[in-house]
Amino acid sequence: MTSKPLAIETDVLVIGSGAAGMYAAIEASRGGVRVFLVDRSLIGRGGATVMAQMTVAAALGEEVPDAPRYHYDDTIAAGRGLCDEDLAQLLCEDAPACIRELDAWGVGWARRDNHITATTAPGHDRARCVYVDFINTGPAVSKTLRTVMARNKDIRKAGDICIIDLVADSNGEIAGAVGWHVGSGAPVTIAAKATVLATGGLTRLYRRNSASLNMGGDGYALALRAGASLIDMEFVQFFPIGHLAPRLVGMDPIMWDPFRYKLGGRLLNGRREEFTSRYGSDEDGKYVLPRDLATYAIFKEVEAGRGSPHGGAYLSFEHCSTAALRGAFGPVIDRLAANAIDLTRMPVEVAPIAHYHMGGVIADPQMQTELPGLFVAGEVVGGANGANRLSGNAITEALVFGRRAGRSAAAHAKTMARKDLRAADARAALELAGDGRLLNTASMIARLQAIMADEVGPFRTAAKLNRALAEIAALADELDERPPRSVGASDAGFDLQRLEWFDLRNMLIVARAVAQSALARTESRGAHQREDFSQMLPAWRRHQRVRLAEGALRLSGPPAEAMVS
Amino acid sequence: MSTVATLKIRRGSDGEPARWETFEVPFEPGQSVLDGLRWLRINKDPTLAMRFSCINANACKECMIQLDGETVYACTARLEPREMTLTPLPNKTLIRDLVTEIAPPSERFK
């Protein structure tokens, strides 16, 4: 057993400080309660939001007439029949208010003629996607929310907190969490009347991804172990044109998306031929191809031996003038030049990269999960985007679901008496703060990322998925029952191996949930493509749920005929 | 031309005497210092403490260290086929190895 934990008590605990967590914290505080906001990374610096260089979808209707119902129609169409309609409706209806509130807080949405200007992202029927120049949307949103929080004394914040597990009280209500402070190694208990999970997605499970380091699916794992159900875990979105080559530092690998919004660009195979028409969509210099189809088209060209030298496709802006490039992207052109990239003279290579997770924790439109006292926000929420997320909906859902979760959590907290974490309820998680044997956790994470990329990518077969499940199980066996401590007890600060052990504990159970769900879904739909079941089947227009029961992940929801095997 | 980069790293926690450790990591043109450090942790010494989050985007600003006495982001400083001296930020409280306390006071656990 380790040292006596530091005990914290609050009304609302928010775990994760991307846009969803920060908006939840702000909104809960406006509801008149005390908030404690924690992050495994630094506040407002990790997560997906700060990485989002792209656009935010909202039916503002400032430049062209628009209404939430049109945004909803596009969201549902992109979701390939699998969107949770109530969540999708909330997403579209609340989006304009959140965008306008951020505008009032000074985020700096790009403007033209005194209107917030919008671009047309693939899958939208009109210009609906707002942004901050130059490719600065995510950092601007993060900074704005951090600044709003800084003015609010009722929001207490702490970075470098790794949450081990949620804790339920004797009534089965979530009563807070147990974690440890990475900076000192000290265990921490946090008693809370309501808890919001806002830890983002799972893209760190993959070798090539567009994620921050703290996106190993922590929220999914915490929810599963607390007894909540996840849905749609097989639907991992790959962003089709992630940067591949030449080596480019200091830029997000999804940076070519805004280039395509503004400048079009041409997607070419290794022979410099346009190829998307072979896969049912002619681009004609415009950026209209949905993400799942583009990913499919690039993979198939590579498979047919027509890939670019590094195994992707070429993206060319060689038809654009220097003036046009500089007008659209200003200082970004200098950053490219520092990487020896001149877009007027050379194409870049792009390839699909793990980007976003459609699946997640089951919640109602109040962001209430199946567990009393537990709320979710942002990418942790499952179902709103179905089998394929529409471009621009990720930051939107972070804002909308974050705001709603904060409001619901505050309302719930106000009905509750003070919570205390009883030693008995917190014991299991605290015991995990003990010490096990040393492991090379960094190489284990790299191995897991290779397994997921090679066997559980966008194109799947039963053989690949079974191989992945066996390899994930082998890694889980290798992981000791206790985290390593690579340094002496008097010297416990920033033990990265210890942190990675907790990351792996979450990543492995989430990897299992993805692979098992993918194995059971014997059809192809949206981001889930089975090479051995290539058709989209009406009987599969349904969600699969995953629960943890006695150490095993139990799936429910497959249609009766698919269960026979 | 050398095909390795030699990283000379100041190790140790606050209050303990510093020790210097030198590692050779494979070098490819275009790589960042962070690439070298991540390779080192996976392949040679996972006990090395460093702070980073966004890996390549220069969005999180968490990987600030000193390279040959100059403050840099490890994700944008280029790895070079020579000896490179890496030290924690001198004006921040040291936690361990290359990690310092860089969060504003209101965003720290206390």
Image: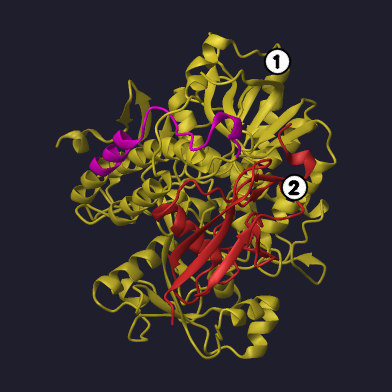
Q: Please provide the residue range marked out in magenta.
A: A470-493
- Residue A549 location in percent, x, y? 34, 22
In the image, is A283 to the left or to the right of A23?
left
Inspect the magenta stretch and tell me whether residue A487 lies in it. yes
Q: Which residue is drawn at 51% across and 52% down?
A: A75
Q: How crowded is mark 1: few (under 14 residues within 10 Å), some or many (20 or more)?
A: few
Looking at the image, how many numbered discs can be counted on the residues? 2
Q: Which amino acid does label 1 sit on?
A: Thr
Q: Nearer the viewer, residue A115 or A338?
A: A338
Does A423 sit above or below residue A503? above
Q: Is residue A444 shown to the viewer in this render?
A: yes
Q: Residue at x 67, y 40 (%)?
A: A159
Q: What residue type is labelled 2?
A: Leu
Tell me the residue that label 2 is attached to. A145
- Residue A353 location in percent, x, y? 43, 61
In the image, is A417 to the left or to the right of A501?
right
Q: Quadrant of the C terminus of chain A?
A: top left
- Residue A255 location in percent, x, y? 56, 68
- Residue A491 location in percent, x, y? 59, 35
Tell me the residue that label 1 is attached to. A415
Q: Chain A is drawn in which colour?
A: yellow
Question: Which of pointers 2 and 1 indicates the residue nearer the eye?
Answer: 2
Circles 2 and 1 on the same chain: yes
